[in-house]
Image (cartoon, rainbow, N blue to C red):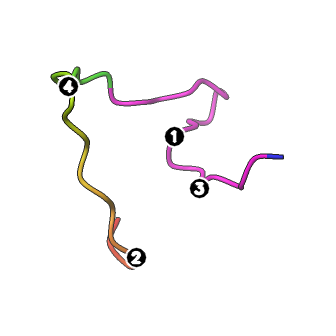
Amino acid sequence: YLSPLGWEHINLTGDYVWQSRRLEDGKFRPLRLPGKP
């Protein structure tokens, strides 16, 4: 079972819209704080 995701990553055609920025090994994307888009 997967936890539910928001709908921001799916556009109206049903395609997934993930940002494709590559990160260096050992690096992480910043967390999205609650209440901020």
Tell me: residue 20, above or below residue 32. above
Q: Quadrant of residue 37?
A: bottom left
Q: Position of residue 2 (x, y in %)?
A: 75, 47
Location of mark 1 (residue): 9
**Of marks 4 and 3, the one in the foreground:** 4
- CA separation in Å, label 3 and label 1: 7 Å
Give the residues in magenta: 2-19
Q: Circle 3 sits on which residue?
A: 6
> In the figure, is residue 10 to the left or right of 14?
left
- In percent of width and height, residue 27 lies at 19, 35
Mark 2, Cα crowd under 10 Å, few <14 / some 14-19 / many 20+, is: few
Q: Do labels 4 and 3 touch, CB within 8 Å? A: no
The answer to which of marks 2 and 4 sits earlier in the sequence is 4
CB under 8 Å between discs 1 and 2: no
- Ranked by sequence position, the earlier of labels 1 and 2 is 1
- For numbered disc 4, what is the local secondary structure? loop
Q: Which residue is mark 4?
A: 23
Mark positioned earlier in the residue sequence (2 or 3): 3
Marks 4, 1: nearer the viewer? 4
Tell me, for residue 34, which label it has, or none: 2
